[in-house]
Image (spheres, rainbow, N blue to C red):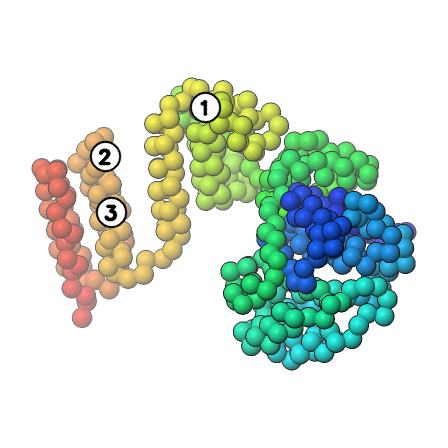
């Protein structure tokens, strides 16, 4: 039985042409190789999983290739290319700066640079996560990085360019990698599914691409897990289940219930969502994103900006025509406030003053609603009394309740809310 190799390693690009979504960088590097205008230091920066280390390895292999193609690609047939592909080449050195970030580690690297390559033209040093180097290590590296031997090339890779000191940045050619687009990710996943004989519909691959957020390594890892989960058949439902994503169809049903003022239907729908194990904050966040998508689709021209799975864009456009923009903006404001209050409700009250503030807020919300009568306000007040800590004496608790009732009565007669009553004295 052959040993399993994850897709991210099995289908790692071996030439510049096979790198996904970074044409602006691969073209520049190929032209520099063809025109013999290769710099001595490069800085590859960008998000995770977009091809920084891959491009560094391809560059190291290509400049040492014995029979380069006319367009500046490695042949993958000569002894140098074969040794690079098998990981046995002595002309490439990779250093993980996250675990080798001291001055002594850089001093060891500088000592290695003094020795010329035994075979090939260049020795390439790839320093990954270079932003993890200490300040002293950066300073120790400056002289070698500025004036290295003619056979040495340094490639620095990082996800956090802002943490690198300016004296290092000024000595390197900087290449900014971008996130891989949704369409490029889907096309690459379809190509891999075809090679591996995996049955996968485009909708499920679009979900995987959205979840990966422009990171190809994450997308391939998710695909491997779903293939194992579904026994080689990737469809929309098992992808939703594996990624723990709530189907957008629920949001369409929920907004329809709101439009029809069907409170019972909305509550039953949320109960169904809750039984599936989705937390309330996740539902609020997803519904906010759904409302924003509807706002984008108010104009069919801007609907092209929406990155929705296959078949849902038309539903968004159709639904957006039946809802006013003012309604959607108000819904977003309410959802934003609700999400904040939902998170705050999970936390314990920090102090008696916090308990009083919460109780007063409950009374304010009750009095502000025109549909609540005096009896409903008193019921709300009884609930708010529970927020008063036990440290208050019974007499002080009653005094506090009396003052809150007075404030509430004043509120009903005035458009301005009076100052919050002072807290009662603590029990001695």
User: How many neighbours does mark 3 have within 10 angstroms: few (below 14), some (14-19), or many (20 or more)?
Assistant: some
Upstream in sequence: badge 1 or badge 2: 1
For the point 68% across and 31% down, which residue is it?
Answer: 202
Per the rendering, the mark at residue 393 is none
Please identify the quarter of the rendering in which residue 308 is found.
top right
In the depicted view, which residue is nearer to us: 232 or 131? Answer: 131
Upstream in sequence: badge 2 or badge 3: 3
One can see residue 294 in this view: yes
| Residue 106 point in image, percent of width and height | 65, 75
User: How many neighbours does mark 1 have within 10 angstroms: few (below 14), some (14-19), or many (20 or more)?
Assistant: few
> Does 338 sit left or right of 177 as displayed?
left
For the point 24% across and 64% down, which residue is it?
Answer: 391
**Residue at the spot of label 3:** 361
**What element does badge 3 sit on?**
helix
**Residue at the spot of label 2:** 369
**What element does badge 1 sit on?**
loop
Label 2–label 3 contact, CB within 8 A = no
> Does 291 sit left or right of 51 as displayed?
left
For the point 17% across and 59% down, which residue is it?
Answer: 423
For discs 3 and 1, the disc positioned in front in the rendered view: 1
Please identify the quarter of the rendering in which residue 334 is found.
top left
For discs 1 and 2, the disc positioned in front in the rendered view: 1
User: How many neighbours does mark 2 have within 10 angstroms: few (below 14), some (14-19), or many (20 or more)?
Assistant: few
| Residue 176 point in image, percent of width and height | 59, 51
| Residue 44 point in image, percent of width and height | 63, 56
Upstream in sequence: badge 3 or badge 1: 1
99, above or below 374, in the image? below
Q: CA distance from mark 1 to mark 2?
A: 35 Å
Per the rendering, the mark at residue 299 is 1
């Amino acid at each position: 039985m052959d040993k399993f190799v994850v897709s991210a390693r099995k289908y790692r690009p071996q030439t510049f042409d096979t790198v996904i979504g970074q044409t602006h960088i691969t073209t520049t590097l190929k032209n520099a190789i063809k025109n013999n205008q290769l710099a001595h230091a490069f800085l590859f920066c960008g998000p995770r999983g977009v091809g920084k280390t891959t491009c560094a390895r391809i560059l190291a292999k290509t400049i040492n290739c014995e029979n380069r193609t006319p367009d500046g690609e490695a042949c993958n047939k000569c002894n140098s290319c074969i040794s690079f592909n098998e990981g046995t080449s002595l002309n490439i050195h990779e250093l993980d700066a996250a675990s080798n970030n001291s001055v002594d580690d850089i001093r060891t690297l500088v000592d290695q640079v003094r020795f010329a390559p035994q075979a090939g033209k260049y020795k390439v040093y790839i320093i990954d996560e270079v932003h993890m180097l200490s300040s002293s290590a950066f300073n120790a590296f400056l002289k070698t990085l500025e004036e290295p031997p003619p056979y040495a090339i340094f490639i620095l890779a990082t996800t956090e360019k802002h943490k690198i000191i300016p004296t290092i940045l000024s000595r390197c050619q900087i290449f900014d990698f971008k996130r891989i687009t949704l369409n490029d990710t889907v096309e690459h996943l379809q190509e891999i599914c075809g090679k591996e004989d995996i049955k996968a519909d485009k909708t499920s691959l679009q979900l995987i691409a959205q979840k990966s957020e422009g990171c190809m390594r994450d997308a391939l890892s998710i695909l491997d897990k779903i293939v194992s989960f579904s026994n080689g058949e990737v469809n929309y439902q098992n992808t939703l289940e594996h990624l723990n994503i709530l189907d957008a169809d629920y949001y369409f049903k929920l907004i329809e219930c709101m439009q029809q003022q069907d409170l019972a239907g909305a509550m039953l729908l949320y109960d169904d969502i809750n039984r599936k194990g989705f937390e309330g904050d996740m539902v609020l966040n997803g519904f906010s994103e759904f409302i924003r998508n509807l706002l984008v689709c108010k104009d069919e021209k801007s609907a092209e900006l929406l990155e929705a799975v296959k078949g849902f864009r038309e539903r968004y456009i159709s639904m957006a025509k039946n809802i006013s923009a003012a309604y959607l903006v108000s819904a977003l404001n309410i959802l934003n406030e609700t999400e904040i209050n939902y998170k705050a409700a999970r936390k314990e009250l920090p102090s008696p003053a916090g308990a009083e503030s919460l109780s007063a807020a409950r009374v304010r919300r009750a009095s502000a609603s025109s549909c609540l009568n005096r009896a409903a306000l008193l019921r709300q007040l009884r609930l708010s009394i529970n927020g008063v800590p036990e440290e208050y004496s019974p007499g002080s608790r009653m005094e506090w309740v009396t003052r809150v009732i007075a404030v509430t009565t004043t509120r009903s007669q005035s458009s301005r809310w009076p100052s919050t009553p002072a807290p009662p004295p603590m029990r001695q």
